[in-house]
Amino acid sequence: MERLMDRQALRRWRMGCGGRVAFVPTMGALHAGHLALVAAARQHADHVIASIFVNPSQFAPNEDFSRYPRTLEQDQVLLEQAGCGALFCPSVAEIYGDGCQTTLRVEPLGSDLCGRFRPTHFQGVALVVAILLNLVRPDQMFLGWKDYQQVILLRKLVRDLALPVEVVGVPTVREADGLALSSRNRYLTPADRQQAVGICRALESVQCSWQGGERRLEVLLASARQVLASFEIRDIDYVELRDAETLEPLLAQEQQSVGQRPVLLIAARVGSARLIDNRVLS
Ligand code: PAF
């Protein structure tokens, strides 16, 4: 696997690629969820390139940018074993030059759900992904469905800017007990870890009610909140049922009978970690 540190090396690598190129953007601290993205990418493309860049612009000053796990050497071994062809790991200056003056806002989606609690987060994500896509020029970009809002938002960005790339979502990889893999799970103490699985249990409980025919929005949301409470998860940012394609709120007439294909989204803090997870009900 080639390790590319700057734009010039990336350009040279890219010019040597015949056929389809798939891109897996990451912030490193890789786990099996990231490796599933590489595996999916390999099925679709002749060349797979991953990036590792802990993007400062998607963290607010009070967030975990400085303590975000950085495990570059280990990540490189994992990517190599997964059959990734190249790794782009630029510095902040390589991405943002001598001070980027451009902002990208995908609104209102970027200010909704996680955006309500992390107001500048999706601007940072949109900006860095647009820059990375311009540099890598892939045919496809692979992202995990665990970050459901990120996938929908980046699909919108790509459509709005007519970027010639397909955004492919890959199913969430979970621990044996159901906890969604996340680089931030490293922040969990053993006691937090036992609590954290409550998020997945809440999703399962709603899925179960849904399969049993329950369609009342308030009843479905109350059941998720009840499970979270039983795991003593009290610091909840949101529990929401939204349209799975657009993430728009369900229509007023759907409050009594939720329509075809909603997605249940949860964001909550457990210990010092902010965790998100989701389940499409269908
Ligand atoms: O999902 C992530 O790891 C990041 O938000 C991404 C897409 C790599 C942009 O920094």
Image (spheres, grey):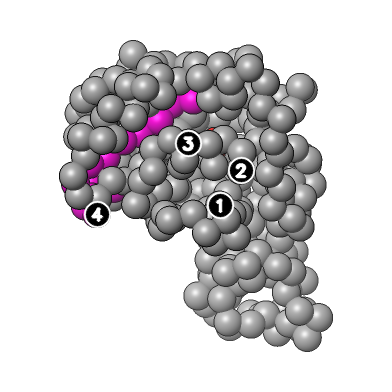
Q: Which residue is mark 2?
A: 126
Residue drawn at point x = 75 percent, y = 37 percent: 120
Disc 4, SS: helix
Task: Give residue 62's position: percent from left, percent from top.
Answer: 77, 22
Is residue 50 located in the magenta-colored stretch of the structure?
A: yes
Indicate which disc, 1 or 3, sits on the residue closer to the N terminus: 3
Badge 1 density bin: few <14, some 14–19, many ≥20, Cα 10 Å: many
Is residue 136 located in the magenta-colored stretch of the structure?
A: no
Q: Which residue is mark 1?
A: 154
Residue drawn at point x = 26 percent, y = 29 percent: 13
Task: Give residue 84's position: percent from left, percent from top.
Answer: 24, 34
- Identify residue type, mark 1: Leu
Indicate which disc, 3 or 4, sits on the residue closer to the N terminus: 4
Q: Of the numbered discs in the image, which one, if any, rests on residue 132?
A: 3
| Residue depth check, mark 1 versus mark 3: number of the one nearer the observer | 3
Q: Of the numbered discs in the image, which one, if any, rests on residue 53?
A: none
Disc 3, SS: helix
- Identify residue type, mark 4: His
Residue 40 in view here = yes
Q: Is the Cβ of the residue at disc 4 closer than 8 Å to that at disc 2?
A: no
Task: Give residue 141's position: percent from left, percent from top.
Answer: 40, 48
Indicate which disc, 4 or 2, sits on the residue closer to the N terminus: 4
Q: Which residue is mark 4?
A: 44
Indicate which disc, 2 or 1, sits on the residue closer to the N terminus: 2
Queried on whether the Cβ of the residue with tag 1 lies below 8 angstroms from ligand 1, the answer reads yes
Start-end of magenta stretch: 41-54
Queried on whether the Cβ of the residue with tag 3 lies below 8 angstroms from ligand 1, the answer reads yes
- Identify residue type, mark 3: Leu
Mark pair 4, 1: CA separation: 20 Å
Looking at the image, which is closer to me, 241 or 10? 10
Badge 3 density bin: few <14, some 14–19, many ≥20, Cα 10 Å: some
